[in-house]
Image: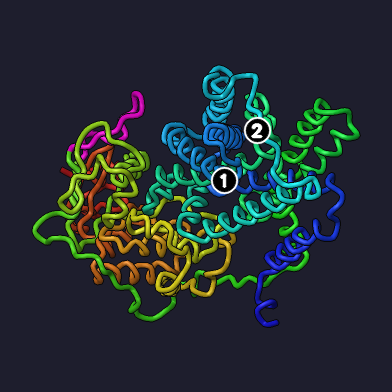
Amino acid sequence: MTRLRALPRAHLIAGICLLALVLYPVINPWNPYPQGVLLLGFLLAIQASSWNIISGYGGYTSLGHSMFLGLGSYTAGILALRWGVNPLWVAPLGGVTALVIAVVIGSVVLRTRGHAFVIITIAMLLAAQILAANFKSLTQGSDGITLQLPFWGRDFQNIPFYYAFLGLLVLTVLFSAWLRRTKFGAGLVAIREDEGKAASIGVNTTRFKIVAYAASAFMIGTAGGVYAYYLTFINPVGSFAILGSVTIVLATLTGGRGTLYGPVIGAFIVNLVSEESTVYGGGSQSRVLIFGVALMLVVLFLPRGILPTAEAWWRKHHPVEVEYTDQAGALSGGPLTTYERTREPAAEDRPLLEVRGVSKRFGGLTAVDNADLVVQPGTITALIGPNGSGKTTLFNLITGGMTADSGEIWFDGKRIDGMRPWNRGHLGLGRTYQVTRLFKDMTVQQNVVAPLPDSRWRTMFAGAVHGHEAARARDLLDIVGLGRMADQPAGALSYGQQKLVELAQVLMLQPRLILLDEPAGGVNPSLLGRLTEVIRELNRSGVTFLIVEHNIPLVLELCDPVVVFSRGAAIAEGPPERIQQDPIVLDAYLGDDWRPAESATPASGKVVQ
């Protein structure tokens, strides 16, 4: 009884529904029509739950996913005829075919995003239909493939297919649930929320997207093999119909995209509506019209789907008290004793970061102009300059968010300007952003454990929040004073709190160098002293910092050396005392307020020569 009470309510309800579905053919074995309607609902739920992996978790909307159902059907049908076996035995090979094709296609089409990706997936579906119609030696063209009738007696009717599709649905939901609980699933959500940020914290976005696309195809292909035997006839138009893909999308959007049970609920609703429109609405033409109107209504009035909308309504009427830590107390802890680095320290005889003659142009605008920069290990280096001088662009070039037009970037003795962003993160290069880029739909703790230290498959499929990583995330959140908010949605935090969470997120990578882009921006001024202590303590533990900041008093107190940027290149470098008296820096950035009193006249503000 205790275990049942501890079980999440959604899983408990799902278990009760599953038990009812398992028992239904036993209670009512003589009516094949409801069984047929339900098993088609199972089939649509399998497709919707699979589509949800790439489009709900990963954010890549595909309108050609019914192609994998057709590929599975044709694979099972062709092999069954050629090998003389029952299509059920080769149905898993339909899943393998769908998986392989998905890897091949995904390696190409996942380079695009948005409308281009949607259009390409439709094109792939139509191309598959054309190939099936014209490759007659293999598919028998438009004549289709006729399979043998089921080997069981008529007394069993659709019951074997009913349980086959129900079993595949259970496996699909369990597979989807397992994926979502791994770092792979968390990485997909990170890609959906902010793909560039996901790459910067070590998520191999290319691999994640291809694996997700393949994972979303396997169960659909396997179900396609069973479906071919259920129909006993396969043809190109029926197997690769675009209406099938639209139905998958509609089912997932109706139930709740990105949720576990939403696609299943939506599939049953859409399937029942489809059946009613076919029986009472005049056939397939009315079904197309109803689907079109339903899709429009869902997008306009229920964009989040049934489950997320119901959950939001429940939270609104049953609010949970959220503990908001004020910024004045957020960093009021004692000494920082919980942060420990396991990476080897950088070699002291060479710079940790070197930027050599790097340039970046946007059309006729030169943002970074043949810039040089050196960051020595163990320092807290400041990068200051007027707005538009190229500081953030340089950060993007260093971390891989942009590609330099020329020049070289070296990190700890390795040239990295040709590396992908996640590889740079794995070397120990981390950054925060001027405008925070947390994954708002994740909890605070999930954000902190999202970074990946390497690209190993074992790491990719490890638990998203588990063991020592969860404990380490709590320690890092305690460092920034937000440990008590670990289970709150990141989007519910104030801007200053999000800045602190982003710092803890970067620390999870155990970086050698952290690039901080205006860390004091949006933070309560009373916190700056403690924030300075945090940075200094981390620096003493072996972390090097490169900081872009417009708070000059903070820079002068915290940083040494200071590099001044103007018009895309460094114009001065040195200790703070020298920089604040440099005439070039005063003219380009600091202004008359920082000039020594004896070297400027109040009337003109010009330097006395």
- Residue 120 visible in this rendered orientation of the protein: yes
- On the rendered structure, is 459 left or right of 133? left
Query: Which residue is at the far left?
Result: 349
State the residue at coordinates (75%, 41%): 298
- Pick the quarter of the image with the N terminus: bottom right
**Residue 412 on the magenta span:** no
Q: Locate residue 86, reporting x and y percent.
A: 60, 41
Q: Mark 2 points at which residue?
A: 147
Instruction: Specify the label residue 468 is tagged with.
Output: none
Amino acid at dot 1: Trp
Q: In this view, does 551 lie above or below 405?
A: below
Q: Is residue 440 left or right of residue 507?
A: right
Magenta residues, start to end = 357-371
Q: Is the magenta stretch mostly helix, strand or loop?
A: strand
Amino acid carrying label 2: it is Leu
> Which residue in the protein does label 1 denote?
89
Spot occupied by residue 174 in the image (x, y as percentages of width and height)? 59, 58
Vertical relation: 359 (above or below) 573? above
Q: How far apart are marks 1 and 2 (CA)?
A: 14 Å
The answer to whether residue 368 is magenta is yes
Give percent across and percent down for residue 410.
19, 46
What is the secondary structure assignment of the residue under circle 2? Answer: loop
Kindly identify the residue that appears in the image at 44 percent across and 42 percent down: 210
Q: Which of 267 and 347 is in front in this view?
A: 267
In the structure shown, which secondary structural element does the residue marked by tag 1 occupy? helix
| Residue depicted at 78% across the width and 37% down the height | 294
- Residue 540, above or below 219: below
Quadrant where the C terminus lies?
top left
Q: Residues within 10 Å of mark 2 (few under 14, many from 20)?
A: many
